[in-house]
């Protein structure tokens, strides 16, 4: 009896995984537990281990295939064994693939969702794809189709998807559009008549640039970011606070933390933790904007944006409002480490209700963070800098940090956003280690 | 159903006995001495010469086929050669009394008949006429090759060389051949000598020859027609249909005045006792003696006789006597001309079905041996004279072979020429300008015309569709177009089942009975093959004909006639023949599985047919006008769902003459969101879907009515798809292999880059048509169209599907074969 190699379900939210590469081929002898393939979810890469020892009789999928979870992707047995029983049924497979596509369609899209029909979704011909007409429109309009979500049958990208995206792009002539669709970048204003972008306005990739196909995660980030800007109304507010209090705390932890039994609580931990506490008081900021309704959440699931080798990741500390500062600090450190290692449980990369992102260590003072839609707020943290203040009639300098709060103006107006930010700054300026408990 | 002919029970129920006339067998008892006196020495020697010519011609082909060389000329002939060695006396005897005006039609085994009839014509034509024919034919190309390469002693000699070379070049598929090489061995013919198409379909000539005789009779043309077919063809349904058609009672009971009388045709069976390998009288057929069949046809037993085809004089005598019968108006005639072929059916035939002893018996009575021996005995010729004739003949065949085998002298036609002769594309008001059309009541007193005068020509009155009985309907549009052409073209005849008196099963011809004499509008027997086959013969003789099949489903009965005859003779003749034949075909519904089918795809698949399917009264009249003024075969589809509708798109159905061209589809709605193409009555259901699309979903469809199926101008359709990016096609034909599938496929290629979704075809289920009450589960419905758009082209918000139009379902159905 042959043993199936099954695509595992890597966390509750994962419906399908991309087969990055096979490390074995048909006919190879393998040991139980040997790594057979690398598998990528939309959030992480993991290794697929052999469920049994034997010969690889067949591999049912090719590298690059997007495969629904719990489907057999290969078979291990003895040389020449008949493994047709283990082969996935083509219709199930096609249907499953379509389902995956549908789930991935953005929930905030104002466009009609595919098929409310009483019948099964298309089995053949669907599975996403792009119509020739849409492809042409993309080439003409310089739209990068990799970032689009299709609204045609089975998630096919059709012309209207491209036209919608193109409406947000600069006006280009034909040559420029073609070049842009190949990956050249266009400025918002060109040197042609009426600001039309011409081919010469496009920035060529630097000399000797190496073309690299997008990885699954890169594609996902690209899509998410573009989606965010295309579907939300982003407004960024900046406010600085006197960081003396939190820096004192940090120094204190450094000096005495160990002896007090405290973990290594960082400035970041203090910032994020205060944000969590403030969010509890501003439930409208701890919410998702879902097109026709707003969902406010009782618990704060704090996403912490972090730079990894594979790109931007946002691991989430679930139920952060129920944690002490010390607990929060431990948890945050663990998930940040996991995210770096790519072995993170995919469920910990989703479900955030608010996100914090810190560019201070890179010397950035303030910036305009992009919302992690459908979240309605994201807090950017800059680097500490000296700021002159008047104290007792004299100019003196304090260490200040600038916070940049981006809100989705669709869900939250500027004034409540500002009040939230003010409250947070006050909390930080008056922070004492004990208050955090 | 003429009311004055009473079917009287007292007559019909009387006891009695049916007597059959006697059928003579080999009754000829003339002698050489008699015939030398009657016909003269030269005539008899001429017969002998022609028999020798045929023998040598076939011998040449046998050598070429089996040894690849004849008289030093090496040649590889890849095509067929069904030889007739042994049968020479039957064809030479037949041709002897025929004039150029007498027309013969033949079979796959007709080389001998071509040569015999050709030589007969050459002998009978004066030199001037003969030369003129040869000079005119295809610009004198064939003649000039003969003239510049072969020395001939006289115009008649030139004529013989021309005949042999022209026929052989045709058999070898050469451009100077009689049909530019497009006919070949089994279809060669030369109309100026009265040699009409030979047919590779067994028995194919029976109904075509009957139609030719119909043409001669109705248009008062001189001459008789002979349909030469094999003994085995007596087993073919269309042959029986043709015989009955030729012998219909109405020619003597109902046709008026000089039109009274039987058809001028001899249905001649070249009875060589075999099909390919099956023996006929003792194995595959029931007749025992073929001539018996005449006795079952009419009270004259068709003047049937068995004639000894091993004696040319017996055959000549029979033809002379039968012609006299036909000229008295007592045709048709059936002849059983016995003969025997020495050669195999074809060069690949190993003669496994007959023994040497049988063949020896026939060789012992070989007609050429016997006839030349008799003539020598009678002192008409000596051995030297005979040898001279034989040498002379070999020089004729050898010269022809040398020229016909030579690629430089006898090149092949450019393939693109075939494209030019698929259709003749002529516009002819009349096929005989010299005559006035024969008409009865075609003025205001005609009951139909009187009725139509009171009806609204506009289909929409005060913004609403006019009531059916107050408007010019689709069937009225048909009537007007037909009547118009009857008034213009004296050669036009119309027939089909229940066409006269009843006015056609769907009343299109009501009023024509009053307008036309019998011989221009008559009821045919229930013989779909003969309806179409005779129409083919009528048309290729140069007359315009409008035939009708009551239901599309009956087309199968006329399969060969539509698919092999009607469609092919223009091109197989290299453009010599025209085929002004319009076949009206009605597509039904409500009557179940054998009365509801749309077979446009079957016709569309066959090269050489023009096909249309108008869906509006305006187009029905305009397209029928176009078809009836053309020179090409047209299958004119009509939907029974539409016979009573008024015109909803054009302001009115004009009273006067106008044409709607073949080619362009008609735009019925303007929109830019999706292109919808329909054929026939499906248009109206597609328009319902179009309305829903607009009202519920804000989508506007560009709706096209594909009224002309072949030819079809794709440009407007491509433009439309480029505009909308989306394409749905619907018709009532079963979806698999339908015309819509081929249009969808073509548009996928022509507008691929413009497509935002695959073209989707909504057709009828690949089932039988169920009962009328269940038809909405079979024929495309407006909801199916919406469902197909929703599932495969563009999701329609909040649309609830009622049918399964997904690709998964299509895969399932295909897997099940349904
Ligand atoms: C409709 C049709 N069926 C079968 C054939 C194949 N076929 C060609 S000739 C032939 C025998 C015909 O016999 P007959 O009509 O007696 O003519 P013969 O060959 O004896 O001259 C057959 C079966 C054909 N050409 N057409
Ligand atoms: Mg025969």
Image (cartoon, coloured by chain):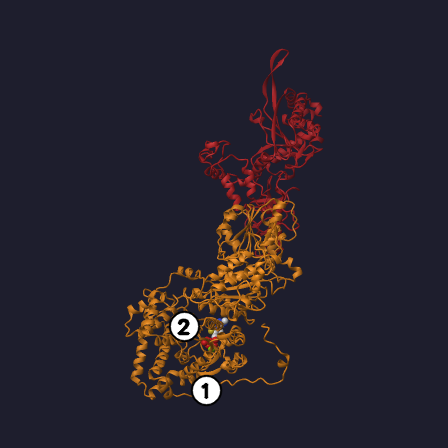
Chain colours: A red, B orange
> How far apart are the alpha carbons under marks 2 and 1?
28 Å
Q: Secondary structure at mark 2?
A: strand
Query: In the current view of this chain or complex, which residue is farthest to the top?
Result: A393
Q: What residue did someone put label 1 on?
A: B27
Q: Is mark 2 within 8 Å of ligand 1?
A: no
Q: Nearer the viewer, residue A233 or B575?
A: B575
Q: What is the secondary structure assignment of the residue under circle 1?
A: loop
Sequence-first disc among 2 and 1: 1
Residue B440: x, y in percent? Answer: 52, 67
State left or right for residue B102 relative to residue B745: left
Residue B187 image offset from top left, x and y in percent: 43, 70
Left or right of B168: which side holds B614?
Answer: right
Q: Can you say which quadrant of the picture contains the N terminus of chain B?
A: bottom right
Q: Which residue is at 35% across, 83% downward? A: B44
Of B249 and B468, the residue lying toward us: B468
**CA neighbours of label 1 inside 10 A, class few (<14), some (14 to 19), many (20+):** few
Query: Badges 2 and 1: C-beta atoms under 8 Å apart?
Result: no
Residue depicted at 56% across the width and 71% down the height: B526
Please report, as a chain letter, where disc 2 is located: B
B177 sits to left or right of B464: left
Q: Quadrant of residue B684?
A: bottom right
Q: Is residue B27 left or right of residue B643?
A: left
The residue labelled by disc 2 is B195
| Chain ID, mark 1 | B
Q: Do tags 2 and 1 sit on the same chain?
A: yes
Residue B500 image point, x, y percent: 56, 69
Residue B23 to residue B699: above or below: below
């Amino acid at each position: 009896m042959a043993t199936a190699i099954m695509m595992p379900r890597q966390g509750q939210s994962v419906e399908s995984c991309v087969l990055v590469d096979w490390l074995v081929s048909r006919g190879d002898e393998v040991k139980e537990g040997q790594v057979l393939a690398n598998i990528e979810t939309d959030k992480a890469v993991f290794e697929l281990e052999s469920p049994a020892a034997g010969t690889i009789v067949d591999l049912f999928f090719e590298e690059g295939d997007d495969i629904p979870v719990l489907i057999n992707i290969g078979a291990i047995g003895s040389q020449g064994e008949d493994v047709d029983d283990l082969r996935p049924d083509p219709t199930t497979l096609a249907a499953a693939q379509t389902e995956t596509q549908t789930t991935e369609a953005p929930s905030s899209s104002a466009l009609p969702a595919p098929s409310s029909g009483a019948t099964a979704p298309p089995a053949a011909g669907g599975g996403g794809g792009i119509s020739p007409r849409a492809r042409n429109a993309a080439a003409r309009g310089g739209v990068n189709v990799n970032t689009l979500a299709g609204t045609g049958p089975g998630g096919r990208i059709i012309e209207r998807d491209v036209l919608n995206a193109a409406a947000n792009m600069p006006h280009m002539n034909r040559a420029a559009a073609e070049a842009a669709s190949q990956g050249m970048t266009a400025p918002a204003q060109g040197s042609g008549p009426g600001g039309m972008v011409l081919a010469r306005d496009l920035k060529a990739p630097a000399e000797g640039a190496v073309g690299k196909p997008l990885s699954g995660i890169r594609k996902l980030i690209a899509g998410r970011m573009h989606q965010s800007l295309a579907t939300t109304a982003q407004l960024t507010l900046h406010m600085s606070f006197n960081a003396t209090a939190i820096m004192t705390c940090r120094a204190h932890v450094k000096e005495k933390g160990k002896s007090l039994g405290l973990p290594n609580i960082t400035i970041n931990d203090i910032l994020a933790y205060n944000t969590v506490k403030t969010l509890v008081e501003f439930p409208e900021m701890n919410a998702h904007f879902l097109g026709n309704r707003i969902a406010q959440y009782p618990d704060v699931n704090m996403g912490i944006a972090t730079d990894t080798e594979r790109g931007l990741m946002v691991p989430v500390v679930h139920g952060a409002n129920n944690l002490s500062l010390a607990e929060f600090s431990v948890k945050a450190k663990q998930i940040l480490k996991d995210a770096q290692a790519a072995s993170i449980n995919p469920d910990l990369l989703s479900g955030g209700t608010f996100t914090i992102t810190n560019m201070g260590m890179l010397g950035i003072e303030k910036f305009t963070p992009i919302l992690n839609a459908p979240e309605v707020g994201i807090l950017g943290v800059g680097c500490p800098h000296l700021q002159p203040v008047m104290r007792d009639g004299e100019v003196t300098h304090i260490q200040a940090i600038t916070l940049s709060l981006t809100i989705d103006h669709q869900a939250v107006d500027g004034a409540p956003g500002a009040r939230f930010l003010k409250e947070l700054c006050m909390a930080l300026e008056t922070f004492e280690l004990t208050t955090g408990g | 159903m003429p009311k004055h002919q009473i079917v009287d029970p007292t007559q019909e129920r009387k006891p009695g006995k049916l007597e059959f006339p006697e059928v003579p067998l080999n009754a000829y008892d003339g002698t050489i001495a008699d015939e030398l006196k009657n016909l003269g020495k030269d005539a008899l020697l001429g017969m002998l010469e022609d028999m020798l010519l045929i023998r040598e011609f076939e011998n040449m082909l046998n050598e070429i086929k089996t040894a690849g060389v004849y008289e030093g000329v090496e040649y590889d002939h890849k095509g067929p050669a069904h030889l007739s060695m042994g049968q020479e006396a039957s064809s030479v005897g037949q041709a002897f009394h025929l004039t150029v005006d007498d027309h013969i039609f033949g079979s796959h085994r007709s080389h001998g008949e071509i040569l015999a009839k050709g030589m007969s014509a050459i002998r009978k034509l004066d030199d001037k006429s003969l030369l003129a024919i040869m000079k005119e034919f295809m610009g004198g190309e064939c003649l000039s090759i003969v003239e510049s390469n072969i020395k001939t002693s006289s115009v008649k000699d030139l004529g013989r060389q021309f005949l042999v070379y022209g026929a052989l070049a045709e058999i070898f598929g050469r451009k100077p051949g009689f049909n530019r090489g497009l006919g070949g061995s089994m279809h060669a013919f030369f109309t100026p000598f009265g040699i009409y198409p030979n047919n590779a379909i067994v028995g194919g000539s029976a109904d075509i020859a009957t139609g030719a005789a119909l043409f001669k009779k109705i248009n008062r043309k001189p001459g008789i027609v002979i349909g030469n077919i094999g003994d085995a063809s007596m087993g073919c349904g269309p042959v029986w249909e043709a015989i009955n058609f030729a012998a219909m009672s109405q020619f003597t009971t109902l046709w008026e005045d000089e039109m009274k009388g039987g058809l001028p045709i001899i249905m001649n069976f070249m009875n060589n006792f075999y099909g390919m390998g099956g023996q006929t009288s003792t194995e595959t057929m029931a007749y025992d003696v073929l001539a018996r069949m005449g006795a079952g046809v009419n009270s004259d037993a068709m003047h049937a006789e068995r004639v000894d085809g091993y004696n040319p004089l017996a055959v000549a005598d029979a033809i002379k006597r039968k012609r006299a019968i036909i000229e008295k108006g007592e045709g048709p005639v059936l002849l059983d001309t016995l003969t025997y072929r020495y050669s195999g059916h074809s060069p690949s035939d190993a003669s496994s079905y007959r023994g040497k002893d049988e063949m020896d018996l026939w060789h012992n009575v070989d007609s050429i041996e016997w006839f030349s021996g008799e003539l020598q005995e009678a002192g008409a010729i000596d051995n030297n004279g005979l040898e001279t004739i034989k040498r002379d003949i070999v020089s004729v065949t050898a010269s022809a072979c040398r020229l016909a085998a030579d690629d430089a002298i006898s090149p092949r036609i450019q393939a693109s020429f075939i494209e030019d002769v698929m259709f003749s594309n002529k516009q002819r008001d009349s096929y005989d300008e010299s005559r006035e059309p024969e008409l009865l009541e075609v003025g205001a007193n005609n009951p139909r015309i009187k009725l139509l005068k009171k009806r609204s020509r506009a289909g929409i009155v005060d913004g609403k569709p006019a009531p059916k009985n107050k408007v010019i309907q689709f069937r009225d549009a048909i009537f007007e177009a037909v009547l118009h052409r009857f008034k213009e073209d004296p050669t036009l005849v119309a027939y089909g089942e229940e066409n006269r008196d009843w006015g056609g099963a769907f009343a299109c011809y009501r009023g024509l009975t009053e307008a036309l004499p019998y011989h221009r509008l008559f009821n045919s027997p229930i013989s779909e093959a003969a309806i179409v086959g005779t129409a083919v013969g009528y048309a290729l003789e140069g007359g315009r004909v409008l035939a009708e099949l009551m239901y599309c489903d009956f087309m199968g009965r006329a399969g060969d006639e539509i698919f092999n005859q009607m469609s092919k003779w223009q091109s197989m003749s290299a453009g010599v023949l025209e085929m002004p034949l319009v076949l009206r075909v009605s597509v039904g519904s409500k009557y179940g599985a054998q009365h509801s089918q749309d077979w446009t795809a079957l016709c569309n698949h066959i090269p050489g047919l023009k096909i249309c399917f108008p869906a509006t009264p305006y187009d029905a009249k305009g397209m029928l006008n176009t078809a009836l003024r053309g020179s090409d075969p047209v299958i004119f589809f009509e939907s029974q769902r539409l016979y009573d509708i008024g015109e909803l798109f054009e302001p009115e159905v004009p009273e006067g003459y106008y044409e709607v061209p073949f080619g362009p589809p008609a735009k019925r709605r303007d929109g830019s969101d999706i292109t919808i193409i329909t054929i026939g009555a499906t248009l109206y259901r597609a328009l319902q879907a179009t309305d829903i699309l607009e009202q519920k979903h804000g989508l506007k469809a560009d709706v096209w009515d594909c009224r002309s199926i072949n030819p079809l101008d794709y440009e407007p359709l491509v433009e439309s798809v480029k505009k909308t990016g989306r394409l749905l096609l619907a018709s009532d034909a079963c979806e698999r292999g339908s015309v819509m599938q081929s249009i969808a496929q073509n548009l996928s290629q022509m507008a691929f880059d413009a497509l935002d979704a695959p073209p989707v075809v909504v057709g009828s289920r690949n089932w039988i048509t169920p009962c009328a009450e269940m038809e909405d589960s079979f024929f495309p419905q407006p909801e199916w169209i919406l469902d197909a758009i929703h599932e495969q082209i563009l999701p329609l918000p909040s649309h609830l599907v009622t049918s399964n139009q997904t690709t998964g379902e299509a895969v399932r159905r295909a897997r099940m074969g349904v």
